[in-house]
Image: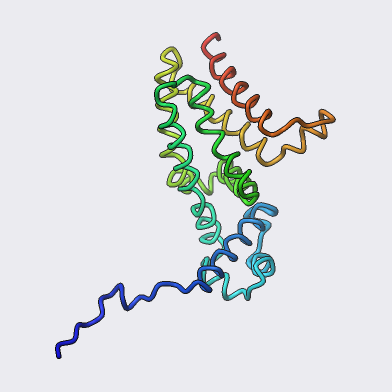
Amino acid sequence: MMTTQPTESERKRAPSKRALATRDRVFDAAERVFAQHGFDGATIRDIAAEAGEPVGTIHHHGGGKEVLFQRTVARRAEALSDARLAMLERIKENLTLETVLEAFIRPFFALSAQDRRWRDYARLVAYVSVDDRWREVSARHFDPTAAIFIAEMRKLMPGASPRQVAEGFVFSVSAMLALLTSGDRIAALGGSVGSEADQVDRLIRFCAAGMAGTLSR
Protein backbone atom coordinates (compact mmCIF):
# COMPACT_ATOMS: atom_id res chain seq x y z
CA MET A 1 0.00 0.00 0.00
CA MET A 2 1.34 3.40 -0.96
CA THR A 3 1.62 5.88 1.88
CA THR A 4 1.86 9.63 1.56
CA GLN A 5 4.28 11.76 3.45
CA PRO A 6 2.75 14.36 5.77
CA THR A 7 2.79 17.88 4.38
CA GLU A 8 4.70 20.69 6.06
CA SER A 9 1.47 22.15 7.42
CA GLU A 10 0.52 18.75 8.84
CA ARG A 11 3.89 18.47 10.55
CA LYS A 12 3.25 21.81 12.27
CA ARG A 13 0.47 20.91 14.63
CA ALA A 14 -2.06 23.60 15.42
CA PRO A 15 -1.74 25.04 18.93
CA SER A 16 -3.88 23.29 21.50
CA LYS A 17 -6.73 25.06 23.27
CA ARG A 18 -4.58 25.17 26.36
CA ALA A 19 -1.71 26.81 24.47
CA LEU A 20 -4.07 29.37 22.91
CA ALA A 21 -5.55 30.15 26.33
CA THR A 22 -2.06 30.65 27.75
CA ARG A 23 -1.10 32.93 24.89
CA ASP A 24 -4.24 35.03 25.39
CA ARG A 25 -3.49 35.26 29.11
CA VAL A 26 0.05 36.44 28.37
CA PHE A 27 -1.11 39.16 25.98
CA ASP A 28 -3.93 40.26 28.28
CA ALA A 29 -1.40 40.61 31.09
CA ALA A 30 1.04 42.47 28.87
CA GLU A 31 -1.72 44.83 27.81
CA ARG A 32 -2.63 45.61 31.44
CA VAL A 33 0.96 46.08 32.61
CA PHE A 34 2.01 48.20 29.64
CA ALA A 35 -1.14 50.30 30.06
CA GLN A 36 -0.41 50.89 33.75
CA HIS A 37 3.34 51.47 33.57
CA GLY A 38 4.15 52.32 29.98
CA PHE A 39 6.82 50.51 28.01
CA ASP A 40 9.72 51.78 30.08
CA GLY A 41 8.13 51.11 33.46
CA ALA A 42 6.88 47.62 32.65
CA THR A 43 9.02 44.52 33.16
CA ILE A 44 8.73 40.97 31.91
CA ARG A 45 8.57 39.84 35.54
CA ASP A 46 5.59 42.16 36.14
CA ILE A 47 3.84 40.67 33.13
CA ALA A 48 4.61 37.12 34.25
CA ALA A 49 3.20 37.86 37.70
CA GLU A 50 0.07 39.41 36.19
CA ALA A 51 -0.42 36.41 33.90
CA GLY A 52 0.37 33.88 36.64
CA GLU A 53 2.96 32.29 34.38
CA PRO A 54 6.73 31.70 34.53
CA VAL A 55 8.96 34.28 32.88
CA GLY A 56 9.92 31.68 30.28
CA THR A 57 6.31 31.43 29.14
CA ILE A 58 6.21 35.17 28.52
CA HIS A 59 9.34 34.95 26.36
CA HIS A 60 7.96 31.91 24.52
CA HIS A 61 4.72 33.65 23.48
CA GLY A 62 5.89 37.24 23.25
CA GLY A 63 9.64 37.33 22.75
CA GLY A 64 11.57 40.14 24.45
CA LYS A 65 9.86 43.18 25.91
CA GLU A 66 10.00 45.29 22.76
CA VAL A 67 8.66 42.53 20.55
CA LEU A 68 5.97 41.73 23.11
CA PHE A 69 4.89 45.37 23.18
CA GLN A 70 4.67 45.49 19.39
CA ARG A 71 2.71 42.24 19.25
CA THR A 72 0.37 43.47 21.97
CA VAL A 73 -0.37 46.63 19.99
CA ALA A 74 -0.83 44.62 16.80
CA ARG A 75 -3.23 42.14 18.41
CA ARG A 76 -6.31 44.42 18.40
CA ALA A 77 -5.38 46.78 15.56
CA GLU A 78 -7.09 44.83 12.79
CA ALA A 79 -10.36 44.47 14.70
CA LEU A 80 -10.41 48.21 15.38
CA SER A 81 -9.65 49.05 11.76
CA ASP A 82 -12.32 46.65 10.50
CA ALA A 83 -14.94 48.18 12.80
CA ARG A 84 -14.10 51.68 11.62
CA LEU A 85 -14.11 50.82 7.93
CA ALA A 86 -17.35 48.88 8.28
CA MET A 87 -19.04 51.92 9.81
CA LEU A 88 -17.60 54.17 7.12
CA GLU A 89 -19.05 51.84 4.49
CA ARG A 90 -22.47 51.96 6.17
CA ILE A 91 -22.59 55.76 6.01
CA LYS A 92 -21.18 56.16 2.50
CA GLU A 93 -24.46 57.71 1.31
CA ASN A 94 -24.36 60.28 4.10
CA LEU A 95 -20.79 61.49 4.29
CA THR A 96 -20.33 64.68 6.26
CA LEU A 97 -17.39 65.77 8.36
CA GLU A 98 -19.32 64.77 11.47
CA THR A 99 -20.35 61.33 10.21
CA VAL A 100 -16.83 60.53 9.00
CA LEU A 101 -15.43 61.46 12.41
CA GLU A 102 -18.17 59.41 14.02
CA ALA A 103 -17.18 56.35 11.97
CA PHE A 104 -13.61 56.73 13.20
CA ILE A 105 -14.34 57.54 16.85
CA ARG A 106 -17.47 55.64 17.86
CA PRO A 107 -16.24 52.06 17.14
CA PHE A 108 -13.48 52.38 19.74
CA PHE A 109 -16.04 53.24 22.42
CA ALA A 110 -18.40 50.49 21.23
CA LEU A 111 -15.64 47.90 21.52
CA SER A 112 -14.64 49.17 24.96
CA ALA A 113 -18.27 48.95 26.11
CA GLN A 114 -18.26 45.26 25.17
CA ASP A 115 -14.85 44.53 26.71
CA ARG A 116 -13.13 46.84 29.21
CA ARG A 117 -9.73 45.58 28.08
CA TRP A 118 -10.07 47.96 25.15
CA ARG A 119 -9.50 50.78 27.68
CA ASP A 120 -6.07 49.37 28.36
CA TYR A 121 -5.51 49.09 24.64
CA ALA A 122 -6.40 52.77 24.23
CA ARG A 123 -3.53 53.62 26.55
CA LEU A 124 -1.16 51.63 24.36
CA VAL A 125 -2.41 53.48 21.29
CA ALA A 126 -1.82 56.75 23.14
CA TYR A 127 1.75 55.72 23.98
CA VAL A 128 2.43 54.70 20.39
CA SER A 129 0.94 57.95 19.09
CA VAL A 130 3.30 60.23 21.02
CA ASP A 131 6.58 58.27 21.11
CA ASP A 132 8.80 58.34 18.03
CA ARG A 133 10.21 54.94 18.97
CA TRP A 134 6.94 53.39 17.79
CA ARG A 135 6.58 55.34 14.54
CA GLU A 136 6.91 52.16 12.48
CA VAL A 137 4.25 50.48 14.62
CA SER A 138 1.85 53.36 13.93
CA ALA A 139 2.73 53.32 10.25
CA ARG A 140 2.03 49.61 9.98
CA HIS A 141 -1.09 49.24 12.09
CA PHE A 142 -2.85 52.61 12.18
CA ASP A 143 -1.76 54.86 9.32
CA PRO A 144 -3.42 52.93 6.45
CA THR A 145 -6.86 53.32 8.04
CA ALA A 146 -6.13 56.90 9.07
CA ALA A 147 -5.20 57.70 5.46
CA ILE A 148 -8.61 56.47 4.25
CA PHE A 149 -10.44 58.72 6.70
CA ILE A 150 -8.21 61.71 5.99
CA ALA A 151 -8.88 61.27 2.26
CA GLU A 152 -12.63 61.40 2.90
CA MET A 153 -12.21 64.51 5.05
CA ARG A 154 -10.19 66.24 2.35
CA LYS A 155 -13.02 65.68 -0.10
CA LEU A 156 -15.42 67.29 2.36
CA MET A 157 -13.05 70.19 3.07
CA PRO A 158 -11.83 71.28 -0.38
CA GLY A 159 -10.80 74.69 0.98
CA ALA A 160 -8.49 73.19 3.61
CA SER A 161 -4.85 72.36 3.02
CA PRO A 162 -3.56 68.82 3.58
CA ARG A 163 -1.79 70.12 6.68
CA GLN A 164 -5.00 71.59 8.12
CA VAL A 165 -6.88 68.34 7.62
CA ALA A 166 -4.07 66.28 9.12
CA GLU A 167 -3.85 68.64 12.11
CA GLY A 168 -7.58 68.44 12.70
CA PHE A 169 -7.50 64.67 12.46
CA VAL A 170 -4.62 64.33 14.94
CA PHE A 171 -6.30 66.77 17.34
CA SER A 172 -9.48 64.67 17.11
CA VAL A 173 -7.61 61.42 17.77
CA SER A 174 -5.97 63.00 20.81
CA ALA A 175 -9.36 64.09 22.17
CA MET A 176 -10.79 60.60 21.58
CA LEU A 177 -7.91 58.95 23.43
CA ALA A 178 -8.20 61.44 26.28
CA LEU A 179 -11.85 60.51 26.82
CA LEU A 180 -11.10 56.79 26.55
CA THR A 181 -8.22 56.87 29.00
CA SER A 182 -8.89 59.73 31.42
CA GLY A 183 -12.63 60.29 31.55
CA ASP A 184 -12.42 60.57 35.35
CA ARG A 185 -10.59 63.84 34.85
CA ILE A 186 -13.86 65.41 33.73
CA ALA A 187 -15.48 64.51 37.03
CA ALA A 188 -12.49 65.87 38.95
CA LEU A 189 -12.74 69.22 37.19
CA GLY A 190 -16.46 69.45 36.56
CA GLY A 191 -17.93 67.75 39.58
CA SER A 192 -20.09 65.32 37.62
CA VAL A 193 -20.05 63.17 34.52
CA GLY A 194 -22.89 62.45 32.13
CA SER A 195 -23.37 59.19 30.31
CA GLU A 196 -20.52 58.11 28.08
CA ALA A 197 -22.90 57.92 25.11
CA ASP A 198 -23.67 61.62 25.56
CA GLN A 199 -19.97 62.38 25.98
CA VAL A 200 -19.13 60.61 22.73
CA ASP A 201 -21.85 62.56 20.93
CA ARG A 202 -20.42 65.82 22.24
CA LEU A 203 -16.88 64.73 21.40
CA ILE A 204 -17.80 64.08 17.78
CA ARG A 205 -19.58 67.43 17.45
CA PHE A 206 -16.64 69.16 19.16
CA CYS A 207 -14.09 67.62 16.78
CA ALA A 208 -16.19 68.33 13.69
CA ALA A 209 -16.73 71.95 14.71
CA GLY A 210 -13.03 72.37 15.41
CA MET A 211 -12.03 71.03 12.01
CA ALA A 212 -14.63 73.12 10.20
CA GLY A 213 -13.46 76.15 12.14
CA THR A 214 -9.99 75.91 10.58
CA LEU A 215 -11.50 77.10 7.30
CA SER A 216 -12.65 80.39 8.80
CA ARG A 217 -9.16 81.47 9.81
Q: Nearer the viewer, residue 123 or 96?
A: 96
Q: Residue furthest front?
A: 1
Name the quadrant of the C terminus. top right
Q: Measuring 53% from the left and 74% from the top, which residue is drawn there?
A: 18
- Percent across and percent down for residue 16 are 47, 74
Q: Nearer the viewer, residue 172 or 25?
A: 25
- Percent across and percent down for residue 8 are 28, 75
Tag count in the figure? 0
Left-right relation of 195 to 96:
right
Q: Residue furthest top?
A: 216
- Percent across and percent down for residue 193 are 78, 32
Q: Measuring 45% from the left and 46% from the top, which residue is drawn there?
A: 141
Question: Above or below — where is 19 with respect to 145?
Answer: below
Q: Residue furthest right?
A: 191
Q: Measuring 72% from the left and 32% from the top, which residue is drawn there?
A: 195
Question: Above or below — where is 66 with respect to 126?
Answer: below
Q: Measuring 63% from the left and 66% from the top, which residue is drawn there?
A: 44
- Percent across and percent down for residue 174 are 60, 33
Question: Above or below — where is 99 with respect to 7?
Answer: above
Name the quadrant of the N terminus. bottom left
The image quadrant of residue 147 is: top left
Q: Nearer the viewer, residue 113 or 144?
A: 113
The image quadrant of residue 203 is: top right
State the colouring used for the structure image.
rainbow
